[in-house]
Amino acid sequence: MTRIYLIEDNPLIAATVTDGLQAFSECDVVGIATTADEAIHWLEANPEAWDAAVIDVFLAKGNGLTVANYLKQNKSRNQRTVVLMNYASSEVREGAQSAGVDAVFDKSLQLDAFYDFCKTLNLSAAR
């Protein structure tokens, strides 16, 4: 089962995404952060405890792209980063791609595609 670290500040969305990942993608959420600093601290302390990080850009404190940029330099080649956000404008998509993320999805329009993408991670998750 693919281990997901979720960076999302809205508790309702975090619960919905967690339930969806388990139901539709056979993924397990191993932790949730609500701020960029909290996420980076956990990722530093647990470098091998996750297979994919799912990142919202707009957080309670800080910016998800800060986390994505940290991961660009500090993840293994088998780990994946995904941005899942509202209003995935072309400008934000470009920023995320510059930060080296593997995929960008809009929460309000692309949840099915997001779950499908995460399901493929199970095929290639290497520990």
Image (cartoon, grey):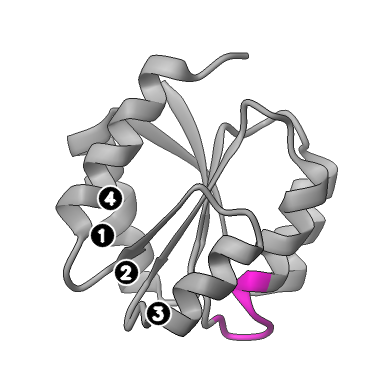
* Residue to which mark 2 is pinned: 13
Q: Is residue 48 above or below residue 6?
A: above
**From the viewer's perspective, is the residue at label 1 or at label 3 nearer?**
3
Q: Amino acid at mark 3?
A: Ser
In the rendered image, residue 48, in percent from the top left (x then y), is placed at 73, 29
For marks 3 and 4, give the one nearer the viewer. 3
The residue at 41%/34% (across/down) is 28
Q: Nearer the viewer, mark 4 or mark 2?
A: 4
Disc on the earlier residue, 4 or 1: 1
Residue in the image at 32% along x and 60% along y: 15
Q: Quadrant of the N terminus?
A: top left
In the picture, the disc for residue 114 is 4
* Image: magenta residue range: 59-65
Give coordinates of residue 74: x percent, y percent.
81, 45
Which amino acid, by three-letter code, is at mark 1?
Answer: Thr
Going from the N terminus, do you reach mark 3 or mark 4 first?
A: 3
Give the alpha-carbon distance from disc 4 to disc 1, as whole Å: 13 Å
Circle count: 4
Residue bearing mark 3: 90
Q: Which residue appears at 66% of the width and 85% of the height?
A: 61
Separation of disc 1 and disc 3 at Cα? 25 Å
Q: Residues within 10 Å of mark 1 (few under 14, many from 20)?
A: few
Q: Indicate which disc, 1 or 3, sits on the residue closer to the N terminus.
A: 1
- Based on the displayed image, in which of its 4 quarters is residue 7 positioned? bottom right
Q: Quadrant of residue 120?
A: top left
In 3D space, how far apart are the residues under numbered discs 3 and 4 (Cα atoms)?
17 Å
- Between 8 and 73, the residue placed more toward the observer is 73
Q: Which mark is residue 16?
A: 1
| Mark 4 or mark 2: whose residue is earlier in sequence | 2
